[in-house]
Image (cartoon, helix red, strand yellow):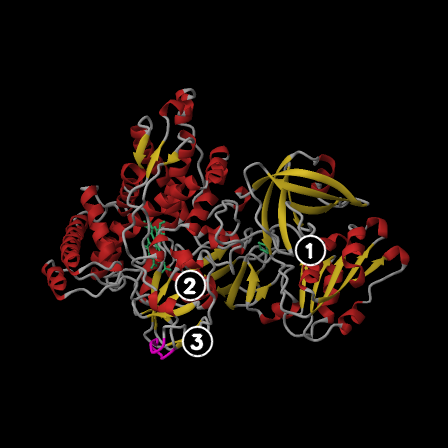
Amino acid sequence: MAEQRRCPVHAAPGSEGLSSEKGRPLSDRAVAFDPFEGPYQVDPAEALRWARDDAPVFYSPKLGYWVVSRHDDIKAVFRDNLTFSPRIALEKMTPVSGEAQEALASYGYAMNRTLVNEDEPAHMERRRALLDHFLPENLLPRRERVRTLVRERMDALVDKGRADLVQEMLWEVPLTVALDFLGVPEDDMETLRRFSVAHTVNTWGRPTPEQQLEVAHSVGRFWQYAGKVLEKMRAEPDGPGWMHQAIRRNAEMPEVVTDSYLHSMMMAIIVAAHETTAHASANMFRTLLTHRDAWDDVCADPSLIPNAVEECLRYAGSVVAWRREATRPVELGGVRLPQGAKLLMVTASANQDDRHFEEAARFDIYRDNAVDHLTFGYGSHQCMGKNIARMEMRVFLEEFTRRLPHLRLEEQELTYLPNTSFRGPDQLWVKWDPARNPERTEPDLRAAHREFAVGAPDRRDIARRVRVTEVTREAEEVLSLGFAPVEGQRLPGWSPGAHVELCVGDYERKYSLCGAPGESGYRVAVLREAEGRGGSAHIHGHVRPGMELRLRGPHNLFRLDEAAEDYLLIAGGIGITPILAMADRLKALRRRYRLHYAGRSRRSMAFLDRLARDHGAALTLHPADEGARMRLPDFVTALPRDGQIYACGPARLLSALEELTAEHPEGTLHVEHFAAAGGGPDPAIERPFTAELADSGLEVEVGAGETLLEAIRAKGVDVSSDCCEGLCGSCEVPVLEGEIDHRDMVLTRAERARNDRMMACCSRARGSRIRLAL
Ligand code: HEM
Ligand code: FES
């Protein structure tokens, strides 16, 4: 059924008389919103599609919360933990009855601040004091233990032919790993699991009054259990694991790592570390087994596993909503929020926001910005255990795809614990034919496996398979290549300005998409560069129709803003490719545009026939050998003040345009460069500097021989990247203080002058320090 679109401001029929906290009329959907039942429990992202489109921030009278649904808004809230305090993160969603309160009190229950719900400056001091164990280099040795645990359980079930994955693998391994990591002696696991469920219902659920009492007793017992464990651990202060470290820190700095923190954290972390990962893993198996092509691809190519895990965390994460409270009146998503406004940020909705992810509702393990999901939160409170969870999920997937590639999901009705924030099925039944287990004929398979680095996925592994359908000569030294998906797959849609990265032999090269409107598959054009590094010559020499290649993307960093009325399109040489796609789009939109295309000679200029046919009226060619030079100042002068310029070509063309538009309004000129200035940092020339990450509270030392991006990632902070040579803009980081030495080709002169952002893959600090909003 088509979604009805309604104005977010005006009242919907039936909502007369109802108002939000500030008197704003409410739509009937806002009034009906109930996260404990109905569509939200089935699919939280889909349940809030209407909100993302029409009311990105709305007040829910049933909850007493403002619901936030878009990626950018939620990220902005996570980033600003002074305006949006995390203090309500573990508050009970449903007020506790007097009887339940009494029951809790009888156990001495006094759950208080941990990390996740602590305000600054206490939070950051504590987080820093407790960070070491989570650093990638300190997590690496744990990988073997995870593998052993998974193998033991796998051996026990591999010949059975049927299993409930949750019961037989997915909750017990994360719980054991969590207890190991914490240094807590393994105990009655089943009881701990029941405690965890009670804690979830108590905090994020809507128990009935009778359930409340039962839950209160379980939570009370959990609290006492946590206290006893803590006492036992205090008796061995030199013990291993994160909680023992916290106990030592408590002795060293009691005002930072407080007694109250220790007891509350002991209880909260068992849930934070195990339930989240167990649910995320169950969601992952469910998602992959219902997208069989993706599962089969992972079976065939295990290097896809880290990104498949990341896409599962995006598409079906285990934490679907998180909370903050406004500490002052503030505007968010165009809505005025009062001081004290409680926010439910539905991260599952942000993760499927089309404004951030191309075709966001589609599950695509080749998506190269899946890592931008908000399932782990973001900023100073971002999940400290994200790399433990990733590690476990990767091992699960690696073991199952290798040893049981023929695994299937059974027909079943999945049930979920009704609550706002934690999501994963109670059971997940799978089946397979043990007679077909590959290890019966290849026993070595049992032990063979692949290891992955700790941290976010390596983008070099994110590539899809395509078939070359056509190789056509478009001009002297220019070939166009057509691609179709391999059998059973579909290529995602793309927008003008998007590029893909071709992997041919040892070469990886980026090319803009330039297929004609309505053409299926992808098309790129490749100029053989005599002075290049060999990639284009290799493509010209080796790529033939019928071949299978790998390709990354599409990814768009040269987006066409469709809001203007007038456009000037300028292409130099092979820069015609993105410009051609833009011209096609502008024509379809019936916008006014002029297209100037310069080249050495007509023989060297690609797509001339198509350009003449489709854009003849707007087109002017400038072949240099005919003396037809471009008069850029005239073109720029002729453009109305609110017009936009899109240009792709050699650096001198783009710099000339930059100079000519220096006084134009922001956003007039959009450029895409061909090539970067070159290589990584040379330690003989560069100087080290310190980067302070304001959101994460970290200090990062950037050595003379490494990039800022590398140094930030080594601290476990995820930053997207693409080209890693200052061309694409995907590694942009906001700068708060410190002078920047810009080395990229992305920012315009005016943007550089503002000194408020930099490309982490190549640019550096001019002085010894720089402060970033990360
Ligand atoms: C915080 C999700 C696994 C430890 C968080 C937050 C979320 C989250 C949403 C709050 C972030 C924010 O406020 O910005 C998840 C998910 C997991 C997972 C989805 C699994 C898939 C783990 C594991 C551990 C862990 C395995 C530990 C072993 C923590 C800690 C914090 C945290 C200590 C508090 C950080 C702070 O406030 O500074 N997690 N988590 N988590 N998580 Fe996780
Ligand atoms: Fe492309 Fe840095 S990753 S500019």
Q: Nearer the viewer, residue 526 or 388?
A: 526
Label 3 crowd bin: few (<14), some (14–19), many (20+), radius 10 Å = few
Q: Which mark is residue 763?
A: none
> Which residue in the protein does label 1 denote?
581
The magenta span reads 16-24
Within 8 Å: ligand 1 and the Cβ of disc 3? Answer: no
Circle 2: residue type: Ser
Q: Which mark is residue 69?
A: 2
Element type at mark 1:
helix
Element type at mark 2:
loop
Task: Determine the CA span between mark 2 and mark 3.
Answer: 19 Å
State left or right for residue 646 relative to residue 46.
Answer: right
Across and down, in percent, residue 488 comes to 54, 38
Q: Quadrant of residue 38?
A: bottom left
Across and down, in percent, residue 583 comes to 71, 59
In the rendered image, residue 19 lying in the magenta stretch gets the answer yes
Camera-near label (2 vs 3) is 3
